Amino acid sequence: MTVNGRNRHRALVVGGSTGIGRGVADAWADTGLDVMVLSRSEPVGAGADRLRWVATDLTDPAQVTESLTAAVDEPLHAVCYSAVHYGDGRALFKDSTEAEWRRQIDVNLHGLWLTLSQALPALRRADSPGVFLGISSEVVYNAGPGRSGYAASKAAAAALLDSLAQEETAEASGTEALSIVQALPAGMVDTPGIRRRRPQGFDYSTYMGPASFAPLARELAATGGAGLHGAHLVVDDAGAWYPAREKMPRSQSRKVSSRTAS
Ligand SMILES: NC(=O)c1ccc[n+]([C@@H]2O[C@H](COP(=O)([O-])OP(=O)(O)OC[C@H]3O[C@@H](n4cnc5c(N)ncnc54)[C@H](OP(=O)(O)O)[C@@H]3O)[C@@H](O)[C@H]2O)c1
């Protein structure tokens, strides 16, 4: 897409229809990036008309490959993976199903792998260093009862990104390296995915909003993630961030009761 005869830099947000991914997509659109969103449902509400949406179900690898092929037909400057399958609710391992586990692996991990396989070459083709932002979670550090599938899939996703960050150096690529950055919220974030798992009338007043990720997203778009390659950043309510290694991310786990008699 061109504006005033100039090519607009392009961005991709997988899981950008709602929640934190939508916060990142909106922030990138604010900076003038041409943003494509992959998700099952179409982005709605203020600013949605600025996002190009390609309907994609991450549990269907053929569809994901087709969507990604369209997304990478031109170089990418910024990519975010925020898609998640939380599951029906927190449940002990003995109450969890294999179908739920497979879905968490498909959406939280395999979709990330598929995205990286196509997005990293497209980021390397950009005329300035690009940035890959993975949305992480405190469960990567803390695990948690009743969250085994979510915690295991998120920890594997974090390890995948860490490994690629170690591979992805200027020396290895022969060009100025792209940046791989992970970011996680300091607390719970009020998103549709979380709301689906809370009772009616739940008090969200202590929850962060997806817009807290906007300042970091804007910074990454402006700098290509320079100086942040390989970082795990904790984003707070005010939109500030700090390295996770400075302060252990706070657990959001709670006691989970059995759904069935043991
Ligand atoms: N919210 C929190 O408190 C919190 C805390 C820690 C970490 N996080 C992390 O933040 C990230 C985003 O979470 P969120 O709470 O913002 O979630 P959310 O509001 O539920 O958004 C999830 C996104 O993933 C997409 N998605 C889910 N299943 C999909 C599928 N099968 N195919 C394609 N797209 C799919 C959704 O789009 P469609 O439904 O339209 O397909 C949506 O765009 C996750 O990585 C999560 O681990 C969140």
Image: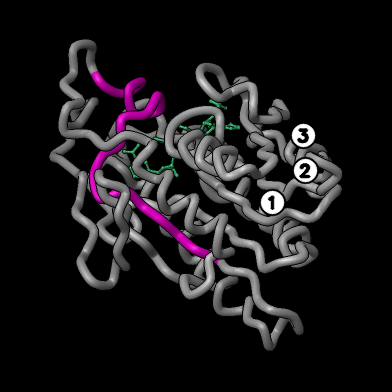
Mark sitting on residue 49: none
Q: Residue at x 19, y 31 (%)?
A: 258
Q: Secondary structure at mark 1?
A: helix
Q: Amino acid at mark 1?
A: Leu
- The residue range painted magenta reads 180-198
Beta carbon of the mark 2 residue lies under 8 A of ligand 1: no
Residue 138: give x, y in percent of width and height: 30, 53
Q: Amino acid at mark 3?
A: Gln
Q: Amino acid at mark 2?
A: Ala
Q: Secondary structure at mark 2?
A: helix
Q: Residue at x 23, y 26 (%)?
A: 259
- In the rendered structure, the answer to whether residue 174 lies left or right of residue 160 reads right
Taking the magenta stretch, the answer to whether it contains residue 182 is yes
Asked if disc 2 and disc 1 are in contact, CB closer than 8 Å, the reply is no
Residue 122: give x, y in percent of width and height: 77, 58
Q: Residue at x 62, y 46 (%)?
A: 111
Q: Which residue is mark 3?
A: 63
Nearest the viewer among 40 and 148 is: 40
Which tag is nearer the camera, tag 2 or tag 3? Answer: 2
Find the distance from the CA under tag 2 to the CA under tag 3: 12 Å
Find the distance from the CA under tag 2 to the CA under tag 1: 13 Å
Please tell me which of labels 2 and 3 falls first in the chain: 3
Q: Secondary structure at mark 3?
A: helix
Please tell me which of labels 2 and 1 falls first in the chain: 2
Q: Residue at x 50, y 70 (%)?
A: 162
Tell me, yes or no, if residue 160 can be seen here: no
Seen in the picture, residue 232 relative to 18 is either above or below; the reply is: below
Quadrant of image for the C terminus: top left
- In the rendered structure, the answer to whether residue 20 lies left or right of residue 140 reads right
